[in-house]
Image (spheres, rainbow, N blue to C red):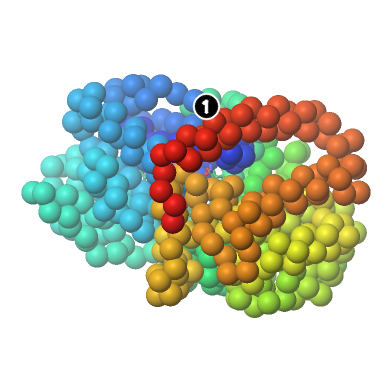
Amino acid sequence: MKIALVELASRDYLDVYAIIGMHRGVPLLAAILEQSGHLVDCFVETIEKFEWSKLTSYDMVGFGIISCTANPTYAMIEKLREAGYQRKILVGGPHATELPEESLAAGADVVVRHEGDRTLPQLIGAIEKGESLDSVLGITWMEDGNIRHNPDQVFLTEAELSVLPLPSFRSIVGYQKMKQISLTFSRGCPFACEFCAVEAMFGPGYRFASVDWRISQLRTLKAEYPEIWQNCSVFFDDDNFYGDKRGKAITLEMLKQIIIEHLILPLGWFCQMRVADGTPKVSRLMKQAGSTMACLGIESVNVDTLKALHKGQTPDEIEKGLKNLHEAGIETLAMTIAGTDTDTFWSFFRGIRQLAKWGITYLQIVVMVPLPGTKMVCRFEAEGRRFSQNLDHYNGMHVVMNPKKMSRLGVWMALYLVTFWFYFISVNGRRLIRKHFRDYIRMIRITFLQGLKCTWQTIKERFTSHHY
Ligand code: B12
Ligand code: SF4
């Protein structure tokens, strides 16, 4: 079969992530389907824009969606149906997993919930043979106008994770433009932060692929994709690069093997980790193995906020971890959240100033988003709290809920003014301007254009939308 797998960008005028050309899970699914002889093209809109009408030539179209890309996906499904596309449309990914009925209502035939690695080939096999979908686990589908929820598929075991193929990067249309790729070595996370959708998506179990498999993925990448090896940096996009004690042992062993086998990526790699894992020894090993940057889920340095988010880390640990990583020569990106229930504007700003004093290299602020399936949304529902249902705004760039101690304007300022302060006014900012002058000019241009669009949109919304 000729299959198209699609990941659309969010349509929002403020979405900075849309300019990061990176895929999620579809090239991996492509590689799995290619093993059974299917021809697969992946359309990742943040990598290359494409005309929706191209999809009509495929025997089957599958969409991977997160919340902020749900609406554009539904709009594209509608266009395909209006154009008379009768073949199967499948949907998967974190948003579809939590709200499968929504995708069916938008015109999809089947929703694959949770992991697609095992379910998708089984589903396609059943469709090809014209068999009933009754026995395909992990799907929600329509039969005679009724919605059917088949029981969940079992999550992949560690042994199964350790035989997955390398994602099929060449199946991504325009893959030559990629500046970074991602590889995933584990599924899930041992922590359970209230706002995070990872547990709902990948289950409570934390599973790792073996060291041998991880190394073989890097070997294959180097041998089969020399152009990517030379020109792309790699994001090891595990939610938590070290995780628990066993995860840490496996990851450290992998780093040692990378050094022994000279699998140091020319443009380096970056990962998401807990700052407390950055001990002096670990930081040095990371550097030797080619790490350039650590993305740290710091969220906040406010003790109350850290407790409320169940982060299980202290400001002292944050300070020490940052020091160790910097001393080893690894840059840091502090990923923080504005608009938690415990922060005020000033406590948030104080926290960021503290992080700046501790020398963080880059800062990412996202506004708290009530992602479907999270414990936070369950709590909000129990408390009867209202939040915006506008999925286009679920990208961390909009104020979509009212925190307890901050006004909506306060959250907005915490995002935009504090980001401006960090990148343009703080000592770090002035250093970064010198280092990344071209990127700054590019960002200023984008921000200006987006600002114009935003002003227009705000004026329009003032007259058309209702408030929550
Ligand atoms: C890499 C990544 C990014 C990258 C690239 C993102 C991109 N192109 O969208 C960057 C850093 C830019 C990013 C940004 C953001 N991200 Co992000 N990101 C991830 C991360 C860490 C890894 C994704 C991945 O490759 N996973 C591994 C693959 C194998 O899993 P997968 O993509 O889910 O695919 C599996 C299944 O979903 C399914 N499947 C997927 N597609 C399809 C398609 C079909 C047809 C089928 C049948 C099945 C199927 O099968 C796959 C194999 O099992 C995930 C967390 C995670 N562990 O997944 C968060 C995650 C996807 N991000 C998330 C969010 C919210 C964001 C942001 C809004 C920032 C924020 N506030 O946290 C922005 C917005 C992005 C945007 N506008 O596009 C959420 C999404 C939750 C949701 N309901 O929306 C996640 C789950 C993390 C979380 N916080 O809970 N992100
Ligand atoms: S540590 Fe990160 S990935 Fe794990 S639950 Fe918390 S936010 Fe999610």
Question: Where does the image place residue 264, in percent across and percent down from the top left?
Answer: 75, 45
Question: Where does the image place residue 367, in percent across and percent down from the top left?
Answer: 60, 55
Quadrant containing the N terminus in the rendered view? top left
- Position of 248 compared to 360: left or right? left
- Position of 151 compared to 24: left or right? left
Quadrant containing the C terminus in the rendered view? bottom left
Q: How many marks?
A: 1
Question: Where does the image place residue 224, in percent across and percent down from the top left?
Answer: 58, 34
User: Residue at position x 69%, y 66% from top?
Assistant: 344
Front position in the image: 134 or 428? 428
Kindly tell me whether residue 44 is visible in this rendering: no
Q: Residue furthest left?
A: 144
| SS at badge 1 | loop
Callout 1 amino acid: Glu
User: Residue at position x 23%, y 27% from top?
Assistant: 82
User: Residue at position x 29%, y 50% from top?
Assistant: 102
- Position of 456 compared to 136: left or right? right
- Above or below, 189 relative to 272: below
Front position in the image: 19 or 214? 19
- Asked if the residue at label 1 sits under 8 Å from ligand 1, the reply is no
Q: Which residue is mark 1?
A: 48
- Above or below, 144 relative to 410: above
Question: Where does the image place residue 240, in percent across and percent down from the top left?
Answer: 62, 63
- Position of 414 compared to 84: left or right? right
- Above or below, 452 relative to 338: above
Q: Residue furthest front?
A: 463
Kindly tell me whether residue 99 is visible in this rendering: yes
User: Residue at position x 21%, y 33% from top?
Assistant: 87
**Res 349 → quadrant:** bottom right
Front position in the image: 166 or 205? 205
Label 1: few (<14), some or many (≥20) within 10 Å? some
